[in-house]
Image (spheres, rainbow, N blue to C red):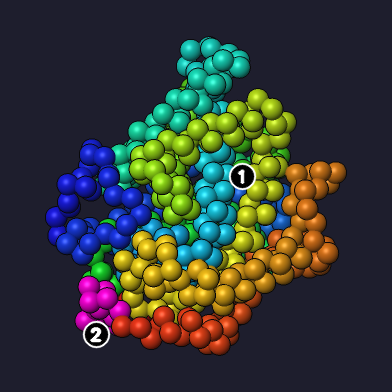
Amino acid sequence: MAASENDRVGSVETRGIEPVPDAERHGHASQMFWTWFAANISILGLPLGAALVSFRGLNIWQAAVVAILGSFGSFALVGALSIAGKRGGAPALTLSRAVFGVRGNAGPTLVTWLSRLGWETINTTTAAFALLALLDAAFGIRRNTVLTVVCLLVFIGCTLLISGLGHATIMWINRWASYVFGLLNLVVIGFLATTVDWGKVFHAQVGPVSSMVVGVGMIAAGTGIGWANTGADYARYLPRRIPGGRLVAASAFGAGIPLVVLISLGSLLAAGEPDLASASDPVSAINTMLPSWMSIPYLIAAFGGLLLSNHLSVYSAGLTMITLGIRVRRTLAVGLDVVVTFAGGIYFILIAKDFYGPFITFLTLLAVPINAWVGVFAVDLILRRSYDGAALMDVGRSSRYWFRGGVAWAAMIAWAAAIVVGLLFTEASTSATDVWFSGPLAHSWIGSNGLGWVVTLVLAAGVYALLRRLDGTVREEASAQPPQQQVLPAPAARELS
């Protein structure tokens, strides 16, 4: 089907969180490939790979296997959850109203919005470092406070332009910019490979299998899990007839290909530069490994890769903000989001002494409630066949998704219980002396190896699967006759499964 006037490249998308009608659905599963390819060609994959060697003691072959399993696996999950967007035509957290209730959904939505803000702040801060370094390398302009603020504003302005235009423009830019920045990254990767201490790489000891298990979890948490609650945002314009398996494959390969390359390269570099894993400024740390004449193309590639990731995050954050109940146009929601991001960037660059430490701490804390949501939402997606578009937009007592007091208690109890248990295994800290939070089981094998998020996801899914059968309001909603426009022919329904 042809794109509507609301979803054309270069025009402002006026649709907010309301479901996309079937008549306006268009596109192919390959769009998800380019969406996640673009989001993952930033340099933040290099420190993740370095951490596998520096902190987990893996050799390059083990690190490559871990990168494949963690990257492809986590984004296969992103692709699977994006099937909900194709079914319901709405953003992920709007569809979540059908799972948690129109009031109960506020908790997961708020956590998701905070998650997006955190990722945007990390991207914005890193991009500002890249732009500052680029100005120094190209023009000899030294970093100062005013220039730092200007660099932050430049990156935020680029993000605002792309995210503000909306879905069609984002999809178009993702594809063509991936070619440009992907090729530029390949050139940089080639030169970085020449700096590898191959003697240390090939003589590295084999790490324990337990470290590989932990490494898979670490890569998944640092890559796909952070995007799991946004996949439906970009699949909502796709026709229902597209098989769900194609979305899973497109997402897994789109993200997996660049991530495996970058994470593996980071593992190689760590053999000679073990401090890369904990660098306070990863852009500068990598830049020092290159000949001076390569700095400019490298820094352009770094800036572009971060921009491609950030405009996706800001777009989703705007939709999440509206779902949260802030009654503004989508474009204004995007604008409010980048204002908060700018403030966060100022803090990270001009006030905070450590960059990567707060990043890991942020991931550790938010992985718990996000994975609890993923577990609940995934079970509901498996059992659900349709969404009521009118009920998704109705937040009053008349809504089909009102359940009991506006809350689907089976989902809320499972989500809350999983968060509590997950936090028992969680420690969030920037250093040994700066501990933000430490659960009583944080130093158990599961906790000390960062696998609390896995426990959270599995427990949330299991508890919800049990309670869903016992909750009368959920059974009543599930047995209700779906809206006529949501009914799918039998072959299509089988494909979605």
Q: How many badges with numbers are in the image?
A: 2
Q: Position of residue 223 (x, y in %)?
A: 54, 54
Q: Is residue 400 visible?
A: yes
Q: Secondary structure at mark 1?
A: helix
Nearer the observer, 389 or 24: 389
Nearer the observer, 167 or 94: 94
Farthest residue in the right direction?
Answer: 433
In this picture, is 29 found above or below 405?
Answer: above
Q: Quadrant of the C terminus?
A: bottom left
Is residue 334 toward the left or the right of residue 241 in the image? Answer: right
- Residue ID at (21%, 47%): 6
Q: Is residue 49 visible?
A: no
The amino acid pointed to by label 2 is: Ala
Asked if residue 194 lies in the magenta stretch, the reply is no
Q: Position of residue 284 (x, y in %)?
A: 60, 29
Asked if residue 486 lies in the magenta stretch, the reply is yes
Q: Which mark is residue 47?
A: 1
Q: Earlier in the sequence, mark 1 or mark 2?
A: 1
In this picture, is 67 found above or below 194?
Answer: below
Q: Which residues are magenta?
A: 482-495
Q: Which residue is mark 2?
A: 490
Local crowd size for mark 1, using a 10 Å CA cut-off: few (<14), some (14–19), many (≥20): many
Q: Quadrant of the N terminus?
A: bottom left
Q: Position of residue 431 (x, y in %)?
A: 79, 44
- Residue ID at (57%, 39%): 122
Q: Is the stretch drawn in magenta largely helix, strand or loop?
A: helix
Q: Secondary structure at mark 2?
A: helix
The residue mark sitting in front, 1 or 2, is 2
